Image (cartoon, rainbow, N blue to C red):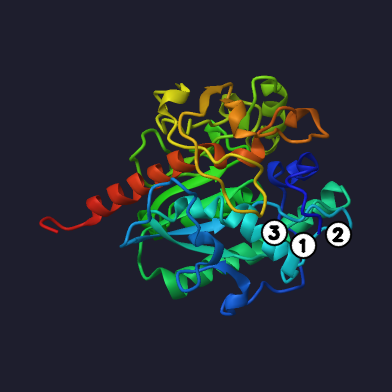
Amino acid sequence: MNPTPWRGLAAIGAVFSIVAPTVATAQSALDYKDPANWAATARAESAAAVVAPGASPRRELRQADVFYVHPTTDFSREHATGEVFDPKLQAWTDGSVVARQAGAFNRCCRIYAPRYRQAAAGPGDPAARQVAIDFAYKDVLAAFDHYLAHDNGGRPFILVGHSQGAYHVRKLLEDRIDGTPLQKRLVAAYVIGMGLTEGDFGRTFKSVKICDTPSQTGCVVQWNSMLPIGDRSDFAAFSQRSYIQRWGDNAGKALLCINPLTFDRSRPAASSSVAKGAVPGAPDAGPMQAIVPHAVSARCEDGVLTVEPSAALGLKPLTASSPHMNGSMHMHDVGLFYEDVRENADLRAQAFLRRKSPPGH
């Protein structure tokens, strides 16, 4: 395991941009009755209980849940599938993403974050990579089914995934949520850092809608962050492959972008004056620094979120080996908008609970 933040992610990109038939594997999913197979639950919150200094406090009564799937944290080229019980990998995953991404949602919600046998960076063969991602999804699906059967208890829930985790959340939406009774309990899905398109809604997802407004529920949010120097057209072409492969080369291939400074599709651009708080510094396993308000502007352009962070944040783009990732702020997709995401998730959860409460309660 190579705990180098996000290096080589461009090579992993094909994992979550290619939709291929699931490849059956002989090995069964992890047993999620075992607490060791969870990075966070309501009973053992661990790193997901962390709150960045200066962020809004957690609610005393959290009546909704978050099911969070972490991004790729194993960047080894020596194997295709990560070893879930590697203590160094677990510590890196918990500090670098569970605390910084899942923890952004702990104001409103109890956090459930499974450990799973993630697709690692691997040797670079696309077919082997797809087998690894399908294998990883088997674990995620088993974890979600266990959560529903043993922990959810009819509570509303939010789905959250970033990068590889977003791929798995997308699959959960399609396989377990869309058009099923569970959809009535979905507060929102934050599918961050992967290529959902406008046309996925109505095709891939028959019932689940795009989140048009900040308090809308039962809907999906997505963004992909990039500096102005990035090539948006190249990124879009890469990210649209899966849609075109599945649904054809039509207008629906336009990438979906919801600006996390506004969470309002009618307001695709916002200045730094409205930014509630970004986490400075590299997204490593160390303690988070205090959030900095008014430190990033963002605008949706060609389906990509163009961001201009303050130099004081000390954030760097990916070290990219593929043109479509040049200028990508992928590893900061959540950290740039930590408090904005935190307050929006709480807003949606409270809106859902108000709508579901009987009159007079």
Residue 41 x %, y % = 50, 69
Label 1 belongs to which residue?
Answer: 82
Seen as rendered, the residue at the extreme bottom is 34
The answer to whether residue 240 is above or below residue 106 is above
The answer to whether residue 260 is above or below residue 70 is above
Identify the residue at image location x=41%, y=37%.
211
Residue 254 x %, y % = 58, 26
Q: Amino acid at mark 2?
A: His
Q: SS at mark 3? A: helix
Q: Amino acid at mark 1?
A: Gly
Q: Give whichever of 248, 8 is nearer the camera.
A: 8
Q: Give whichever of 6, 205 is nearer the camera.
A: 6
The dot on residue 215 is: none
Identify the residue at image location x=35%, y=67%.
154
Q: CA distance from mark 3 to mark 1?
A: 13 Å
Q: SS at mark 1? A: loop
Can residue 178 be seen in this snapshot?
A: no
- Tell me whether the residue at label 3 lies in contact with that at label 1, contact meaning CB atoms closer than 8 angstroms: no
Q: SS at mark 2? A: loop
The dot on residue 79 is: 2
Q: CA distance from mark 1 to mark 2?
A: 7 Å
Residue 116 x %, y % = 66, 65
Instruction: State which mark lies toward you, 3 or 1.
Output: 3
Sequence order check, earlier mark of 2 and 3: 2
Identify the residue at image location x=39%, y=23%.
266
Sequence order check, earlier mark of 3 and 1: 1
Q: Give whichever of 164, 299 is nearer the camera.
A: 299
Label 3 belongs to which residue?
Answer: 92
- Tell me whether the residue at label 1 lies in contact with that at label 2, contact meaning CB atoms closer than 8 angstroms: yes
